Amino acid sequence: MASILKQYKVRDWMTPNPITISPRTTLPEAHQIMKEKRIRRLPVVDENGHLVGIVTLGDVREASPSDATSLSIFELNYLLARLTVDKIMTRKVITVTPDTPIYEAARLMLEHKIGGLPVVEDGRVVGIITESDIFKMVVRLAAEE
């Protein structure tokens, strides 16, 4: 199976044209997109489409207020509506290219304990590869054996 994994490229299993957001997207907007689209991470791109960060569902949850706050619900909603993802996103994003071997993408995810990698070509996000994509590949290849 290892030799088979080494022959496949990220482009064979990635989700092309992923949903992206701008750094000025508010936290509630990002959270709403994740809920509606049932995704856990959003690449953040500038006005030229270049990757500048990534925000995950965990980042959004962590930035949400705790139940121990003394702020009123109105104050909380006001503050959250003004918080943009550029304040909480990860800026040093680990990426792969479409030609990266799937094995290398999986190794990077394991090594860095992350569930997905933006796929970048010429500085632009062209896809995303997640642990779910790799699980699908393993199951499909095992079924074919």
Image (spheres, helix red, strand yellow):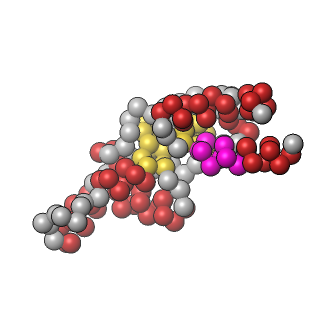
Locate residue 86, reporting x and y percent.
33, 44
Locate residue 75, reporting x and y percent.
17, 67
Q: Quadrant of residue 68?
A: bottom left
Q: Is residue 130 magenta?
A: yes
**Which residue reaches farthest bottom?**
73
Locate residue 19, reporting x and y percent.
54, 51
> Would you place residue 83 above or below residue 35 in this image?
above
| Quadrant of the snapshot with the N terminus | top right
One can see residue 97 in this view: no
> Would you place residue 8 above or below residue 86 in this image?
above
Name which residue lies at 67% across and 31% down.
103
Decide if residue 107 is on the left or right side of residue 82. Answer: right
Locate residue 137, reporting x and y percent.
73, 44
Q: Quadrant of residue 69?
A: bottom left
- The rendered magenta stretch, by its main secondary structure, is classed as helix
* Residue 95 or residue 3, whichever sits in front: 3
Decide if residue 85 is on the left or right side of residue 96. Answer: left
One can see residue 34 in this view: yes
Decide if residue 102 is on the left or right side of residue 89. Answer: right
The segment highlighted magenta reads 129-137
Name which residue lies at 87% across and 42% down.
145
Name which residue lies at 42% across and 39% down.
53
Q: Is residue 69 magenta?
A: no
